[in-house]
Image: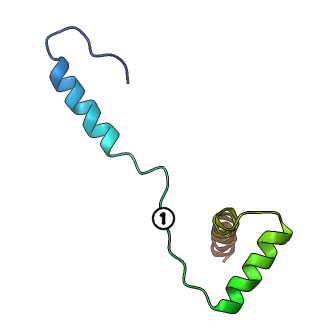
Protein backbone atom coordinates (compact mmCIF):
# COMPACT_ATOMS: atom_id res chain seq x y z
CA UNK A 1 0.00 0.00 0.00
CA UNK A 2 1.04 3.59 -0.34
CA UNK A 3 -0.22 6.98 0.52
CA UNK A 4 -3.62 8.15 -0.69
CA UNK A 5 -3.36 10.29 -3.80
CA UNK A 6 -4.53 13.86 -3.42
CA UNK A 7 -7.61 13.51 -5.66
CA UNK A 8 -10.39 14.17 -3.19
CA UNK A 9 -11.05 10.41 -2.85
CA UNK A 10 -8.80 9.91 0.14
CA UNK A 11 -11.58 8.92 2.60
CA UNK A 12 -12.71 6.09 0.26
CA UNK A 13 -9.11 4.97 -0.22
CA UNK A 14 -8.55 4.85 3.54
CA UNK A 15 -11.76 2.85 3.98
CA UNK A 16 -10.56 0.25 1.43
CA UNK A 17 -7.19 0.04 3.20
CA UNK A 18 -8.87 -0.52 6.57
CA UNK A 19 -10.91 -3.40 5.13
CA UNK A 20 -7.79 -5.01 3.63
CA UNK A 21 -5.93 -4.76 6.92
CA UNK A 22 -8.84 -6.18 8.90
CA UNK A 23 -8.91 -9.28 6.67
CA UNK A 24 -5.38 -10.28 7.61
CA UNK A 25 -5.14 -13.33 9.89
CA UNK A 26 -4.11 -12.75 13.49
CA UNK A 27 -0.41 -12.99 14.30
CA UNK A 28 -1.01 -15.72 16.88
CA UNK A 29 -3.79 -18.14 17.66
CA UNK A 30 -4.39 -19.61 21.09
CA UNK A 31 -4.77 -23.40 21.24
CA UNK A 32 -5.98 -25.41 24.22
CA UNK A 33 -4.52 -28.90 24.63
CA UNK A 34 -6.06 -31.65 26.70
CA UNK A 35 -3.39 -34.21 27.58
CA UNK A 36 -3.24 -37.34 29.65
CA UNK A 37 -1.11 -36.63 32.74
CA UNK A 38 1.53 -39.15 31.60
CA UNK A 39 1.77 -37.46 28.19
CA UNK A 40 2.14 -34.06 29.86
CA UNK A 41 4.87 -35.36 32.18
CA UNK A 42 6.73 -36.87 29.23
CA UNK A 43 6.41 -33.65 27.21
CA UNK A 44 7.68 -31.56 30.12
CA UNK A 45 10.67 -33.89 30.58
CA UNK A 46 11.53 -33.55 26.88
CA UNK A 47 11.09 -29.75 26.99
CA UNK A 48 13.36 -29.53 30.02
CA UNK A 49 16.00 -31.74 28.38
CA UNK A 50 15.83 -29.54 25.26
CA UNK A 51 15.96 -26.38 27.39
CA UNK A 52 12.65 -25.14 25.95
CA UNK A 53 9.83 -23.34 27.70
CA UNK A 54 6.55 -25.29 27.77
CA UNK A 55 4.90 -22.93 25.31
CA UNK A 56 7.83 -23.11 22.88
CA UNK A 57 7.98 -26.89 23.15
CA UNK A 58 4.32 -27.33 22.24
CA UNK A 59 4.56 -24.85 19.36
CA UNK A 60 7.55 -26.73 17.97
CA UNK A 61 5.91 -30.12 18.53
CA UNK A 62 2.77 -29.06 16.66
CA UNK A 63 4.84 -27.60 13.81
CA UNK A 64 7.05 -30.68 13.43
CA UNK A 65 4.13 -33.08 13.84
CA UNK A 66 2.13 -31.27 11.17
CA UNK A 67 5.11 -31.34 8.78
CA UNK A 68 5.54 -35.10 9.37
CA UNK A 69 1.84 -35.77 8.76
CA UNK A 70 1.96 -33.75 5.54
CA UNK A 71 5.06 -35.63 4.27
CA UNK A 72 3.36 -38.93 5.06
CA UNK A 73 0.19 -37.93 3.24
CA UNK A 74 2.14 -36.77 0.19
CA UNK A 75 4.09 -40.04 -0.03
CA UNK A 76 0.92 -42.16 -0.16
Tell me the element at label 1: loop
Report the coloring of the rendering. rainbow
> Residue at the location (65% across, 74% down)?
69
Place residue 68 in its image quadrant: bottom right
Q: Nearer the viewer, residue 72 or 67?
A: 67
Could you say where residue 2 lies in the image, as x and y percent from the top left? 37, 19
x, y (%) of residue 41? 73, 85
Please name whichever residue, 16 or 40, is drawn nearer the observer in this view of the structure: 40
Name the quadrant of the N terminus. Answer: top left
Q: Position of residue 3 (x, y in %)?
A: 33, 16
Q: What residue did someone put label 1 on?
A: 30
Instruction: Give coordinates of residue 17: x percent, y percent.
Output: 28, 31
Identified at 41% across, 50% down, the residue is 25
Q: Is residue 52 above or below residue 6?
A: below
Q: Is residue 30 above or below residue 11?
A: below
Q: Nearer the viewer, residue 27 or 42?
A: 42
Instruction: Point out the residue furthest to the right here.
Output: 49
- The image quarter in which residue 15 lies: top left
Q: Residue furthest top?
A: 6
Looking at the image, residue 35 sits to the left or right of residue 26; the answer is right
Amino acid sequence: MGFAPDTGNAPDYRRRCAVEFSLKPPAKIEVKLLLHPHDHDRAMAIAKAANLAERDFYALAIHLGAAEILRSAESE
